[in-house]
Image: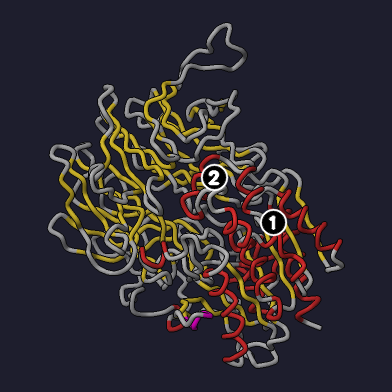
Amino acid sequence: MLNLETLLRVPDVEAGIGFSLSPDGRRLAFAWNKTGQSEIYELELVGQIATSRFSDLSPADLPITQLPNYQLPITNPPITMLSSGPGGKFAPRYSPDGKTLAWALDLDGSESFHIILLDLATRETRDLTPEIDFTIQPFYAWSPDSKQIAYLADKAGNFDLYLRNVDSPLLAGEGPGVRSDRLLFSPSGPASFVRWSPDGLHLAVTADQEWQADGTFIVPLDGGEPKRVGGDAHPLDAGQPAWSPDGAQLVFTSNSSGWSQVGVYHLADNRIEWLTEDEGDKYNPAWSPDGRRIAWICNNRGETAWVEIRSENGTPRRVQTEAGFAYWPTFTTDSQSVIFVYDNPRRPPDLWRAALDDGRLTQLTDSLPAELRSAEFVIPEAVAYPSLDGTPIPAILYKPKDASPQSPGVVVIHGGPAFNLAYFWHPFLSHLASRGWTVIGPNYRGSTGYGRDWLVSNRYELGRLDNDDCAAAALYLARQGLADPARIAVTGRSHGGYLTMTCLTRQPELWAAGASVVPFLNWFSGHENSREDLQYWDILNMGDPVEYHDLWRERSPFFFLDRVRAPVQFICGENDPRCPPSESVAAHNKLLELGIQSELLLYEGEGHGFLKLENVIDSEVKRVEFLAKVLEK
């Protein structure tokens, strides 16, 4: 059996927000939880060349179950930890002049990020945003002259675009720590992503707009009117913009055609040039410094994802690795290599570099400890099964060697809901499978990776269609002889925690136990106690709470807790801004009143995603122990 604590102590490079390459191309800054807390590290890139490659592998054609466990030589480049102190550090960004490194700091899990500046010469740090009583998004951008930072904050009830001078003085008479910021742009929905053009003339800002659609706006610095990519007459989904080196073009991704495709927007004439038109979602586009190549991540129907590179003559090329997932391709300053984060079920997220001349790979960071290199991980497989209405539901299945009709089973539900379970590094799932439990992760309607129709199919159906897709996974395990129908549990995080509770209240006969992690349970109270951007999402996806009152109540498991028949565990964080812990506390107390076994684990100083490794370990170990009491009787 794989030890869960050992797996959870394996560090991983943060993949969701990305890393930063220094302007001279010699250093790479990234977030890594090697000490048990996410800190900022700097890696020396000079001279790191690999001698091995996966030249015969195609991630689109060969699943990981058919690949040997390759071990590349690791170059062990010099790595230095740059940050310290309390809180999780994320999203490092070098200033264009190379003198300063910024990062986002979350002190208590509340996602109220501060922007911290490190002087790379003196190693002195300072908080650029010490006075904030609002929330800042972790995506921000330096001006090309390194004198300003553009950031997104909900100062006025919406995530708007502000500019702050890096060396702006405190304003006298306005209270300690108050600075003058310039409000540059207020989109109609909350903004989440910003990038500054290399010529300094524009900012590209992405904000929620129509239902399940982002709008990317070109915001001029001279006070001109912002323009939406694609225009306003026919709204176009557009996100994750990246500038061309000359600032004249913008590459972005859009799911307006059904699959997320890559397009290039030309500022001079508002023309859009589409680079892809095939199946499979694309994201994280990047432009090479010489302007001759564009890279992006290509997702193979939610299962695997790899780096794809398009040259100026239109020739596509893949970076070849084992089947797994890649994130945030970034070209080196000489445009001859691409760096990305990569993981799979037996490799934690690490930084890799691929040479573009011959495809050679270098593993830049090494997170997997020696004792796990030869460990026997259960490698998942992609399956599909019918939902309660017959719709085929894609899923990831962890099937132990000795799976049988007597095996325990667990349905693990991902959060989001716009996310998916795939060929990821996932210590919790790996541990469950190593215990001999059959584990299935449904990619229910509303998940990413399967095109726009699948993504938007759960509008006004949250808590019903997605619930039924997950409940049907238990029936599939029993029908296939992979689990004992009397010993199947359900568990999930965030939206997955919500669906855990809808499953326990809508199909109580299916479940032996349920563990709900950082859930919301009552649409009304969850909405009232959430941030403005989350309220915006609620209304777009489930309607106004007054107009759709009956729907909101019918989809709130809190009102139907008397239907629960299995023991329930709630795990939550004290400072969670997304799914307030009051939801779990109220449900726990109600279950106890009803005489239903319930356990509550409330972690102080934590938010939606736990920052402290010891709390991550404690909560996950106790989640397994809770399920094991029922499943291993």
Here the colouring is secondary structure
Q: Which residue is mark 2?
A: 535
Residue type beneath disc 1: Val
Residue 452 position by quadrant: bottom left
**Is 307 or 252 nearer to us in this picture?**
252
**Is 24 or 236 nearer to us in this picture?**
236
Q: Magenta span covers which residues?
A: 383-388
- Give the left or right position of residue 626, taking residue 521 as reference: right
Q: Which residue is mark 1?
A: 616
Q: In this picture, is 391 found above or below 443?
A: below
Q: Quadrant of the C terminus?
A: bottom right
Image coords of residue 310 (percent x, y):
22, 59
* Helix, strand or loop for disc 1: helix
Image coords of residue 344 (percent x, y):
49, 69
Q: Is residue 475 visible?
A: yes
The residue positioned 25% from the left and 64% from the top of the image is: 358
Is residue 514 within the magenta segment?
no
The residue positioned 18% from the left and 38% from the top of the image is: 267
N-terminal of the pair, mark 2 or mark 1, is 2
Image coords of residue 494 (percent x, y):
61, 57
Q: In this picture, is 149 found above or below 576?
A: above
